[in-house]
Image: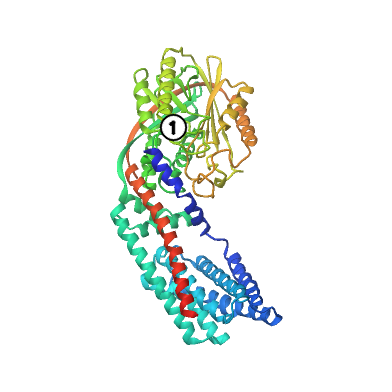
Amino acid sequence: MAFSSHAKIRRTVPYYKIVRKVAFPSMPRILASTLLANLLGLAFAFTLFEFTVEALVEGLVFGLIVLTIPSIFSDLLLHALVLKKDPLFYLRRCFALSLFSCLIWIAVMFAAGVASRWLNGISFPEFPFYLGFFIVLPVRTISTLSMSTATLWRRSISSISQPLACVLAGVALWNLSLINSLAALFLSSLLAFTSTSALLIYVERKGFMKIGSSPLRTFRAFLLDWLDGRNEMFEDYLKELGTRETINIALLQFRGKNSHRPKAIMITSNFHPGPFLNVGSSVLPLLIQKVLESRTGTVVSVPHGVSGHELNLISQEENETVLNEALHLLDTSDFSGEATRFIRWKSEPAQASCQVFGDSALITLTLSPRDMEDIPLEVGSSISLEASRYFKNVAVVDAHNSINEVKPMSEDEIDSLVESARRSIETASRAGKSSFKIGASKIDLSPYRLSQGIGLGGAAILLVEAQGELSAYITIDGNNMKAGLREKLLEGLERIGVNEGEVMTTDTHMVNGIVPARLGYYPVGEAVDENEILTRIINGVNEAKRNLEEAEVAYANSKVKVMVLGLGAFAKLTEFLYGVAKLVAASMVLTMVISTLVGVVVLI
């Protein structure tokens, strides 16, 4: 089931690649593009119709006075009088929609210029200009009616504002027929509004039946966050779908044995850092890291717990609940100065490690170098139950460190994860304990960006020396890792004297949906130089070696109730939005085709 919902998300990747493009470039670039496209495009179209200098000049003038100037002035008035408070259709997007409309007009004019070579009697530029209404209006109508939050009459005005301004300019400055121009505008508008209204009414009805809420409101809230980073509206919507669940938080706090100064913290929880960008718990690993760093002044590692999209927190208020609980867990005085060595067990294809600190076990799980996505929640519960037979406390980490393609986790892989964890736990329960040392460092990865799959938290390194062996726990702020990179990093550490260790990611979803990547994001290592990452990790481990000191550790855990999206609601939401995206795309194409055919029949 966990894979099913993730697969639905991945199927929407082609659509949000398109959505990302709706952000559009800067306003100066849009205006410059509008001017150049209209002048050069129309000049070329006019010369195709009649290869003369006069036609070239006419095209330049037509592009300037009939398309460019009316488009810009109509958008300025539209923004000032009609859409001033619209969160999505601010001035830059009004200009961008008009640019797209002009590009459609240019394409139609260009096609008419080509067709005139074989067809006689084409009235140029009147025929293609009027025909353009039948393609431009459906695009503008479905964009404004579905995306804008303004009242219906304001959205309606927005749909026809630019075409109407171009009509009036054409009539006044180019001697186009007023009756023919208004008739073409009226008929194309009628077709566009009728078809779009029917589509949106159908989508709304289906949406209320499927998800119990308005899909258009969801869509607008989604776009507002995706394009502008404003998550309030989307999170308010998610609150209507949320359910209350209990999540576990486990915290290992290391300090100097003699100095009692904080040395390092590792905290893991079974919330899921999703669904994307800054919505819900997508940002929570970074928030936890920052809050604990601020309180303790030490290195904080936040690896991914065993969880799936069923435990996405729905809002920043729920994040605050987790942050407050994490701070509360710092208030412990039950420290121990003993640990076992790092114990790994391989049960192909899985690997698990177990290292005991005091009476608490730290367990990591991986399928690397095989593809692995979120380990099912039940696996973590089963392993925790097994560990509780031997240890007072347990923290289980999904290393989340190998992916090339999203694949369902097979029963054999799940069984091997449980088996390797069980064997490592049993072995660790019989292992001797001794005093241990801790070294820690934080690696600045700020030269890399979210668009490259590297989160804002950088990388945290915890180095443990126990019974003469060095083991490293490396946590990189990212969503999974390029297959094979984990092995390359561990081999590099072995060359500098680190006997064992694990490389983990936070599974932050702040990197999701930013770039048109095949997975919807870049795993760590896919969009950056692996050797540079290795060099930075080795430098960080060497720094941790230099500050190794006798240490002691305290374990604290807690359960906290939070509102989560829930797997059922999440699956329904993603599945429905995917279906809506397909329906709207197909309907827009069909509407444009039908409207164009009607326009050709009427205008000929």
- The residue positioned 46% from the left and 72% from the top of the image is 597
**Residue type indicated by callout 1:** Ile
Where residue 412 appears, as percent x and y from the top left, is: 42, 26
> Vertically, is 301 above or below 554?
below
Q: Nearer the viewer, residue 25 or 574?
A: 574
Q: Secondary structure under badge 1?
A: strand
Which quadrant of the figure has residue 454?
top right
Near mark 1 (Cα within 10 A), the count class, few <14, some 14-19 or many ≥20, is many
- The residue positioned 44% from the left and 59% from the top of the image is 585
Quarter of the rendering occupied by the N terminus: top left
Where residue 59 appears, as percent x and y from the top left, is: 64, 78
Name the residue furthest right: 53
Q: Is residue 534 left or right of residue 263?
A: right
- The residue positioned 69% from the left and 78% from the top of the image is 51
Q: Is residue 525 visible?
A: yes
Where residue 180 appears, as percent x and y from the top left, is: 48, 84
Q: What residue would you read off at disc 1?
A: 267
Q: Tell me how many marks there are.
A: 1
